[in-house]
């Protein structure tokens, strides 16, 4: 895809979501700062560098969502993103990233990068791709923004289900970015044991929305 088309997609994401700043109470921010400071003092050098980048590139005060995802990226994935990308994602600037397997993803924040990279489940991903090396059909229930589905579509036909509007919007963009429209059928519905309507409980984390969990924030 040429750069102009990529820029059009990026602007489309900006228009759809906007850049919304999240404001939190002073007490909440103080607790987060204390936790981050304590973690830094106890951490190894590599982890210290990761947190330093976080504090450097935040234009606002730190928030718990970014901080917790950053921990996952450091400990599970080795912080596999460059300075510029980290800065953009911490400031919620829509970004298109390209991974070593030649997949491209439109993302907005650190958690999107986490789910797009699939760095936290390399063995599971490798197993699935081995099973699909000669083609087949892959069903992705809870597709998020397409971490599995886009990669599976290289060799297989994919039926993907993602009910949450934000995730589904990015998923559809990522299908276009990777030119797999003919291989992926995406449905903005939940999967369950009956045909009908259900309440989707929305989490502050993009990968934890649920039909069952009542411990997360309703929308």
Image (cartoon, rainbow, N blue to C red):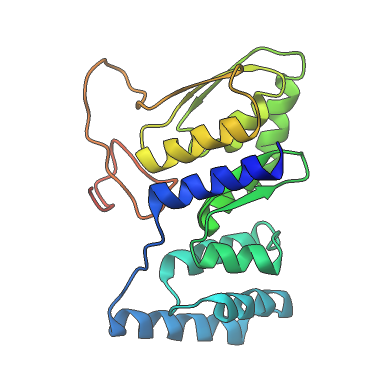
Between 45 and 83, the one lying in front of the other is 83
Compared to 51, does 7 lie above or below?
Answer: above
Name the residue rendered at 36%, 43% in the picture: 209
Name the residue rendered at 65%, 57% in the picture: 76
Q: Horizontal placement of 46 versus 73: left or right?
A: right
The image quarter containing residue 62 is bottom left
Percent position (x, y) of residue 199?
22, 35
Name the residue rendered at 58%, 31% in the picture: 176
Percent position (x, y) of residue 151?
67, 31
Name the residue rendered at 70%, 79% in the picture: 44
Percent position (x, y) of residue 58?
52, 76
Between 163 and 105, the one lying in front of the other is 105
Residue 113 shows in the view: yes
Q: Farthest residue toward the front?
A: 4
Residue 116 shows in the view: no
Compared to 61, does 202 lie above or below?
Answer: above
Give the number of marks: 0
The image quarter containing residue 86 is bottom right
Q: Horizontal placement of 182 versus 163: left or right?
A: right
Percent position (x, y) of residue 143?
49, 33
Question: Which corner quadrant holds the N terminus?
Answer: top right
Between 136 and 81, the one lying in front of the other is 81
């Amino acid at each position: 895809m040429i750069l102009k088309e990529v820029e059009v997609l990026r602007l489309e994401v900006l228009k759809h979501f906007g850049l919304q700043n999240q404001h939190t109470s002073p007490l909440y921010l103080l607790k987060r700062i204390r936790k981050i400071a304590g973690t830094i003092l106890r951490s190894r050098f590599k982890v210290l560098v990761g947190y330093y980048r976080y504090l450097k590139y935040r234009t606002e005060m730190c928030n718990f969502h970014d901080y917790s995802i950053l921990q996952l990226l450091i400990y599970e994935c080795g912080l596999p993103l460059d300075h510029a990308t980290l800065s953009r994602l911490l400031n919620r600037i829509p970004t298109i990233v390209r991974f070593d397997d030649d997949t491209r993803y439109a993302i907005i924040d650190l958690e999107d990068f986490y789910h797009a990279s699939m760095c936290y489940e390399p063995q599971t991903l490798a197993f699935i791709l081995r099973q699909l090396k000669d083609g087949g059909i892959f069903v992705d229930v809870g597709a998020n923004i397409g971490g599995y589905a886009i990669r599976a579509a290289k060799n297989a036909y994919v039926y993907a289900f993602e009910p949450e509007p934000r995730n589904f919007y990015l998923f559809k963009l990522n299908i276009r970015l990777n030119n797999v429209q003919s291989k992926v059928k995406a449905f903005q519905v939940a999967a369950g044991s009956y045909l009908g309507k259900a309440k989707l409980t929305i989490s502050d984390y993009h990968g934890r929305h649920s039909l069952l969990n009542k411990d997360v924030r309703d929308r």
